[in-house]
């Protein structure tokens, strides 16, 4: 807060109804234009397939990163029934680069359940949506509110940040999640309308105004009711517990070449990057692999040459992957031309391949 600026009244002086009206009025003019949503107050419903697909894609990534994937998916598979009929390998390849590949497998399970059990139409209540495979409480609430205008409490990271600042919640995340959900639920009125717009308005406010770091309080429609701003330190919230250091692992990836093609293997269905095509690799462990250990992890005997290493960060650990290149015959591998080999590979293996071919 600037020197001499008058503190706004605390949130207790602004009731939920007044704050709700202010935020919806702001959303009517400031809503983000996104390909998976209808315009605010337009009276038209967003396709539940679009809402569901976008929400799954947006888990653990950003709107700019997810948008081209969403457009590619909906061009290739314009309905949930089209997606349900797709081959697993096609969907997994199209998902490459979005991470959390279990989400892609669950995406297919859910699409096939909707097609087989609901005639290709998403059910319209939060409870029915939650019963579908791969849909958790947040996604069920988001689809129910945005696609079906149901009074569901949609709380993502943006909404948690807004509520934490609005009420100056002193409990740190993740411990505060229950309290933040309860605060957000206080704005849900079954007798009101525009439930989908309300959910998206809160998301947009957190993404564009009440953003991480220093919020733009001057542009916030809720500033005259925000307890964190009244206290003069809105950037202090949300409080967070200190994270434990991320473990670091080491592995080896092998770029095996034969007649202008690269050997790719299918990873096991269960586990990290399950079911994805990848370069042959060693186990990933907490200490580096020595050249003397290559024979025990290489996919075939060859004159392996170290081409360098790549770094990659997963959610729960970081990884250094040494990249070895050689001419080799890899039993059971799928051979792809060098020019096409990176298509559909998870990011870590695409980087390793690029390093190996440099």
Image (tube, grey):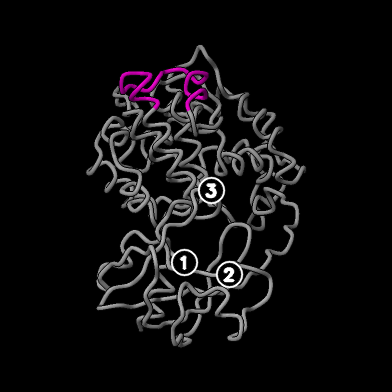
Nearest the viewer among 55 and 156 is 55
Real-space CA distance between mark 2 and mark 1, rounded to the nearest whole angstrom: 9 Å
Q: Residue at x 35, y 81 (%)?
A: 357
Nearest the viewer among 192 and 7 is 192
Q: Position of residue 58 (x, y in %)?
A: 45, 46
Which residue corresponds to mark 1? Answer: 348
Q: Nearer the viewer, mark 2 or mark 3?
A: 3
Real-space CA distance between mark 2 and mark 3, rounded to the nearest whole angstrom: 19 Å
Which residue corresponds to mark 3? Answer: 270
Q: Residue at x 67, y 33 (%)?
A: 11
In what element is the residue under mark 1?
helix
Magenta part of the chain: 113-132
Q: Position of residue 161 (x, y in %)?
A: 61, 44
Which residue corresponds to mark 2? Answer: 319
* Sequence-wise first label, 2 or 3: 3
* Image quadrant in which you'd find residue 8: top right
Above or below, comparing residue 84 to residue 99 in the picture: above
In what element is the residue under mark 3?
loop
Nearest the viewer among 227 and 252 is 252
In what element is the residue under mark 2?
strand
* Image quadrant in which you'd find residue 81: top left
Circle 1 packing at 10 Å, graded few (<14), some (14-19), many (20+), is: many
Where, quadrant-wise, is the C terminus in this rendering?
Answer: bottom left
Above or below, comparing residue 330 to residue 86 in the picture: below
Above or below, comparing residue 341 to residue 242 in the picture: below
């Amino acid at each position: 807060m600037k020197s001499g600026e008058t503190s706004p009244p605390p949130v207790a002086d602004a009731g939920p109804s007044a704050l709700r009206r202010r935020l919806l009025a702001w959303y009517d003019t400031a809503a983000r234009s996104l390909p998976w949503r209808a315009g605010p107050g337009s009276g038209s419903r967003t396709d539940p397939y679009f809402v569901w697909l976008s929400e799954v894609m947006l888990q653990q990534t950003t709107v700019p990163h997810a948008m081209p994937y969403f457009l590619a998916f909906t061009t290739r598979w314009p309905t949930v029934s089209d997606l349900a009929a797709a081959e697993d390998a096609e969907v997994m390849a199209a998902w490459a680069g979005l991470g959390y590949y279990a989400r892609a497998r669950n995406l297919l399970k859910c699409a096939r359940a909707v097609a087989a059990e609901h005639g290709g139409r998403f059910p319209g209540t939060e409870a029915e949506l939650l019963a579908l495979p791969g849909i958790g409480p947040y996604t069920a609430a988001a689809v129910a509110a945005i696609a079906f205008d149901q009074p569901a409490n949609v709380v993502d990271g943006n909404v948690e940040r807004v509520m934490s600042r609005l009420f100056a919640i002193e409990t740190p995340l993740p411990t505060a999640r229950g309290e933040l959900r309860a605060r957000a639920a206080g704005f849900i009125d079954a007798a009101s309308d525009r439930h989908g717009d309300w959910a998206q308005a809160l998301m947009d406010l957190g993404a564009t105004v009440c953003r991480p770091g220093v919020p733009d309080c001057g542009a916030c429609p809720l500033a005259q009711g925000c307890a964190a701003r009244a206290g003069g330190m809105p950037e202090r919230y949300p409080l967070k517990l200190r994270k434990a250091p991320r473990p670091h692992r080491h592995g080896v990836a092998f770029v095996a070449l034969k007649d202008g093609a690269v050997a790719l293997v299918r990873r096991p269905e269960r586990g990290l990057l399950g079911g994805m095509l990848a370069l042959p690799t060693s186990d990933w462990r907490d200490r580096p692999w020595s050249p003397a250990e290559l024979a025990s992890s290489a996919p075939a005997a060859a004159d392996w040459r170290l081409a360098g290493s790549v770094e990659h960060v997963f959610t729960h650990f970081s990884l250094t992957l040494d990249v070895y290149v050689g001419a080799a015959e890899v039993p059971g591998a799928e051979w792809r031309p060098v020019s096409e080999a990176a298509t559909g590979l998870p990011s870590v293996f695409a980087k390793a391949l690029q390093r190996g071919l440099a």
